[in-house]
Amino acid sequence: MIKRFLNWIREVLKNMISKQDVRQAVGVEIALTDLMAQNIELWGDMYQNKSCWLNTDVKSLGLAAAVSSELARVATIEMTAEVEGSARAEYLQSQIAPVVEKARHWVEYAAAKGGIILKPYPRGEDIVVDYVQADQFLPVNFDGNGNITAAAFVDNKIDGNVYYTRVEYHEIDGELYTVRNKAYRSTSKQTLGREIPLTQVADWEELEPEVIIAGVDRPLFAYWRYPMANTIEPFSPLGVSCFSRAAELIRQADEQWGRLIWEFTAGEMALYVSTDAFKKDDNGDPKLPNKRLYKTLDVNNVGNELFESWAPALREQSFMAGLNEILRRIEFTCGLAYGTLSNPEDIARTATEIKMAKQRSYATITDMQKETANALDDLLAAMDIYASLLSLAPKGAYTTTYDFDDSVITDQNEQLQRDLQLVAAGLMSKVEFRMRNFHEKEEVARKAVEELEAVGISFFPDEE
């Protein structure tokens, strides 16, 4: 969708149309450099196994998708979000629930391409969410904290040989929030074409060309940014892919995998047999009983021998060792623990190395979980504004609690024993212990402790 739009921009620039003309066509100055656009496209291609270095000899290991998927899986597994406090909170809980349920998917897309925008919009009595990936929107402006305050979203419709494009522009200025919609019609997918009324497209006929909302001081969308510094453009607020720093290593791994596959293919057992040893077809060509095993050769070239065997020694261990080392470098660069992609039998053995690997993975996942909670907070705030503007639910305060199951990245037994020691030393209450280790709310944990103590059951052996 956005690639077509970006391709249009590149095409008109080639035809000597000025940047001013492009700005006037879309109505805004786009804050996306060619360098960032190229990298976002590269990350998308890598994620979809369409890397430019792949060919008949170099096959993809799917590492870009594997890294993104694993990070998203661990960061969101058994994630929950509870919105409480009022009737408005109950409404928001029902609206945010589908987003949380799909978190593993959209977090994966965001990690792969550097970010994603969660854009809510009313539909009947509900508020649904568009998941706009990094190659599907155009950032326009940022505030001092790097938050996107203006952006253009592009939607496309195709009707036969006619291409319809809608540019939806969001901008905030003080406490005035503006949403503009423009539609275009073209007979070429490479050009934006001429502007048309929104009513000419059925799906857009109910949209207003411009809506200005007063009293809104924040964007009506949320931006999830991968929590890693941007080394492509250090001064850009845009996020980068979780594997952006390992792109070259992933290319090397794919090439090494190609070498390994070729080693097995070239090392297959074969018999080179004289053409005189086979029956002939109607064209006089030898009829091979097994084309994979038998190869023909001219008997004059082998000293009049009828066949010669081919069974070279394989060097797969050297190729696999080289591949495994590249995979370990990818793990380190992407903040994954050793053994996630590489051979787990070759992971670090010393206590210090194991601890450092766990800390690296834990830090990566923790940062992603914080970013997920922040994005959901911004999304809830936008939903709350829509709920008030359209009277979808009674007004009221709400609080949100997020729970990320960290059992995948922490040793539960180790944590349990450590917490028991803290309780025994008086540094942690029994209620805190249950909340942390049994994932109970405070009131549930407190009631459980009181009930156990009321019947004389000791929760901790040392108290008997």
Image (spheres, rainbow, N blue to C red):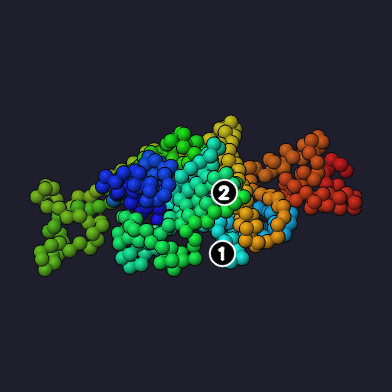
Give 431 or 19, whichever is nearer the viewer.
19
Q: Which residue is under mark 2? A: 176
In x, y percent, where is residue 146?
53, 39
Of badges 2 and 1, the one in the foreground is 2
Give 348 or 131, whichever is nearer the viewer.
131
| Callout 1: SS | strand
Give 195 or 424, whichever is nearer the viewer.
195
Marks 2 and 1, how far apart at CA: 23 Å
In x, y percent, where is residue 366?
60, 41
Asked whether residue 352 is in view, the answer is yes
Choose top left, top right, bottom left or bottom right for residue 252.
top left
Residue drawn at x 43%, y 66% as measured from the top left: 199
In x, y percent, where is residue 333?
47, 37
Q: Residues within 10 Å of mark 2 (few under 14, many from 20)?
A: some
Give the mark count. 2
Residue drawn at x 49%, y 65% as measured from the top left: 206
Q: Report the quarter where the N terminus lies.
A: bottom left
Q: Residues within 10 Å of mark 1 (few under 14, many from 20)?
A: few
Q: Report the quarter where the C terminus lies.
A: top right
Residue drawn at x 78%, y 39% as measured from the top left: 428
Cβ–Cβ below 8 Å for labels 2 and 1? no
Residue drawn at x 86%, y 50% as measured from the top left: 450
Q: Which residue is under mark 1? A: 123
| Callout 2: SS | strand
Q: Amino acid at mark 1?
A: Arg
In x, y percent, where is residue 97?
62, 58
Earlier-in-chain disc, 2 versus 1: 1
Q: Amino acid at mark 2?
A: Leu
